[in-house]
Image: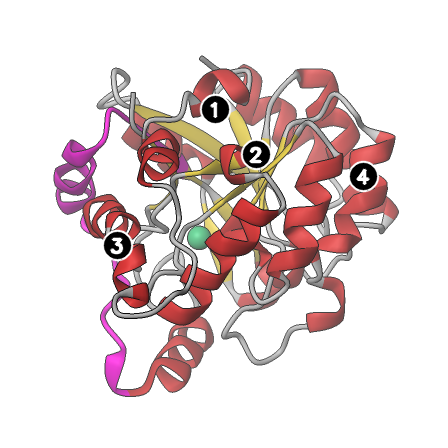
Amino acid sequence: MIVDVHTHVWECPCHIGEKFIADARRTAGESYKDISVDLDKHWEAMQAVDRAVVLGFRARHVGVLVPNEYVAGYVALHPERLIGFCSVDPQDPDAIEQLDDAVQRLKLRGLKMGPIYQNVAPTDSRFRRIMGRAEELGIPVLIHQGATFCENVSLEIANPLQLQPLALEFPRLRMVIAHLGHPWIDETLVLIRKNPNVYSDISALYYRPWQFYNALVSAMEYGVLDRLLLGSDYPFTTPEATMAALRQVNSITEGTKLPRISEAKIEAMIHRDTLDLLGIG
Ligand SMILES: [Zn+2]
């Protein structure tokens, strides 16, 4: 089964603030493409996979507020293929109530967090109590722990090593670090190597081909290629383009003696039983 563990839906500009879009545009320069999502186009793109996780996103600090109801309403149209994850902002005093409601009433099956966007460190008690509740609820958490293009954020709280205390405090909690925690990729790899319930997705990396290739070589050398999950970060790219890039990752080595990533391991990553690993199969 092929699972895209990382896709977004939102309405622009209703759910996404102007500053977020302006920062995306400024940092992408000429390669900027519209990040608004048309749900029909999302659905069309997901025909390339068997299952897709659709993420909520609540981060008032950067002006992103995708309602959990919106995610639940969309995935309910295609329950055979789409799996909804909610999001809660740790700055909300009622974040725990929001999480309980999203899981129990809206039937969302996981949680998306983004400390750098939410401006709350993973070690902060407001963040930790949400992780504790996720562990009690038995739901996986996908965490954007890595850099971003947004201007008014703290890179200091974005390093994947900030998740280490959570992995130790909540050993039953299944976590997925988004984007291999770029640019702290080796930190992510050693974290997932030692903590059996921590995984990482490879989304939104292939358009830096040298970094992407090196990330997979590092993962191979640390012996954690089997802990990496397929993800696209739609609408920034599609699962189809991501799978094509994975299958071509060795093209960079042609005519050289650089190490090659095992094609069999790449196919295994694409076909990984991600939902079983995350306890939502
Ligand atoms: Zn994303």
Q: CA distance from mark 1 to mark 2?
A: 8 Å
From the viewer's perspective, is 224 left or right of 262? right
Q: Is residue 278 above or below residue 205?
A: above
Q: Which mark is residue 65?
A: none
**Secondary structure type for disc 2:** strand
- Mark 2, other Cα within 10 Å: few <14 / some 14–19 / many ≥20: many
Compare residues 113 and 13 and report the one nearer the observer.
Answer: 113
Q: Position of residue 42 (x, y in %)?
A: 20, 43
Mark 3 lies on residue? 245
**Secondary structure type for disc 3:** helix
- Which residue, as the protein is rendered here, is positioned at the far top? 281
Mark 4 lies on residue? 166
Mark 2 lies on residue? 111
Tell me where the magenta segment starts and ends, as one range: 30-54
- Whichever of callouts 4 and 1 sits on the residue coming sooner in the sequence is 1
Task: Look at the image and tell me whether residue 218 can be seen.
Answer: yes
- Whichever of callouts 3 and 1 sits on the residue coming sooner in the sequence is 1
Q: Is residue 11 above or below residue 109?
A: below
Q: Are marks 2 and 3 in contact (CB under 8 Å)?
A: no
- Whichever of callouts 4 and 3 sits on the residue coming sooner in the sequence is 4
From the viewer's perspective, is 88 left or right of 8? right
Tell me the residue at 26%/70% (across/down): 255
Q: Position of residue 167 (x, y in %)?
A: 78, 35
Compare residues 191 and 44 and report the one nearer the observer.
Answer: 191
Q: CA distance from mark 2 to mark 3?
A: 27 Å
Mark 1 lies on residue? 108
Q: Is mark 2 within 8 Å of ligand 1?
A: no
